[in-house]
Image (cartoon, helix red, strand yellow):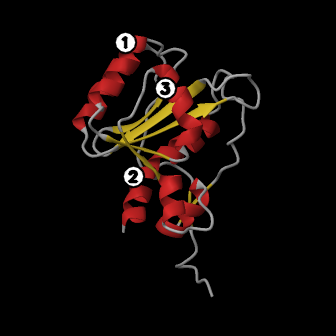
Amino acid sequence: METEDTLPQPLLEPRTPYGKVVESNTEFEGVIHELALGSGPIAIDAERASGYKYSQRAYLVQIFRRGGGLHLIDPIGADSPELWNRLGETFSDVEWIIHASTQDLPCLTELGLRPRILFDTELGGRIAGFARVGLAPMAEALLNLSLAKEHSAVDWSKRPLNPEWLIYAALDVDVLVDLRDKVFE
């Protein structure tokens, strides 16, 4: 019987605060610098509009690193191929954590991001024998956190981005490093 102490705690805001959406190359340079100040792996996710557009293009990229912050980057405004390549090169020797990487790797590669060291939390969950390997069920099982997933199928190509969507997007990377750590236990 579940008690109030064992019920998953709703995670309604990211545990790591984030600033405004990065919409310029100047702001993007600052993000790369901030992430470099952190340590450990980076968690990365991308939001697409595949249900609305005939494309797998990323319309938002979320990145988290302990000590380096949580950042939401709009690749429409922060569109410098040189900066996306620099981001990839800066963290080429760092582990990247992605949930369901087969969905996000094509659009991340399109931006110039090609992780060399990758941990896929979905695949880790499968190997560990979890019956349900979606991000929300794994966060509940391993972190006792409940993630709202109602914005997973919105049109991320629309601007301005809805603030509720941004919270949803930030939550995806906010839990990934902890989730990866728990899968390893």
Which corner quadrant of the image does residue 24 belong to? top left
Disc with the residue nearer the chain's start (2 vs 3): 3
Tell me where residue 32 appears, x and y as whole percent.
Answer: 32, 26
Name the residue that disc number 1 marks.
Answer: 82
Mark 2 neighbour class, 10 Å CA radius: few under 14, some 14 to 19, many 20 or more: many
The relative height of residue 5 versus residue 99 in the rendered view (above or below) is below
Secondary structure of the residue carrying tag 1 is helix
Residue occupying the far bottom of the picture: 1
Left or right placement of residue 142 versus residue 4 in this view: left
Q: Pointer 3: what residue? A: 109
Please determine whether, in this image, residue 126 is positioned above or below residue 7: above
Q: Position of residue 19 (x, y in %)?
A: 43, 32
Q: Position of residue 1 (x, y in %)?
A: 63, 88
Q: CA distance from mark 3 to mark 1?
A: 14 Å
Left or right of 110 on screen, residue 134: right
Q: Which residue shows up at 37% across the image and 16% down it?
A: 83
Indicate the secondary structure of the residue bearing disc 2: helix
Q: Quadrant of the C terminus?
A: bottom left
Q: Secondary structure at mark 3?
A: helix
Distance between mark 1 and mark 2 Cα atoms: 27 Å
**Of label 1 and label 2, which has the lower sequence position?**
1
- Measure the alpha-carbon separation of dots 2 and 3: 21 Å
Q: On residue 177, which mark appears?
A: 2
Residue kind at label 1, given as amino acid type: Glu
Mark before the other along the chain sequence, 3 or 1: 1
Residue 30 is situated, as x and y percent measured from the top left of the image, at: 32, 22
Would residue 137 be seen by someone viewing this image from the given angle?
yes
| Disc nearest the viewer among 3 and 1 | 3
Disc 2 residue type? Val
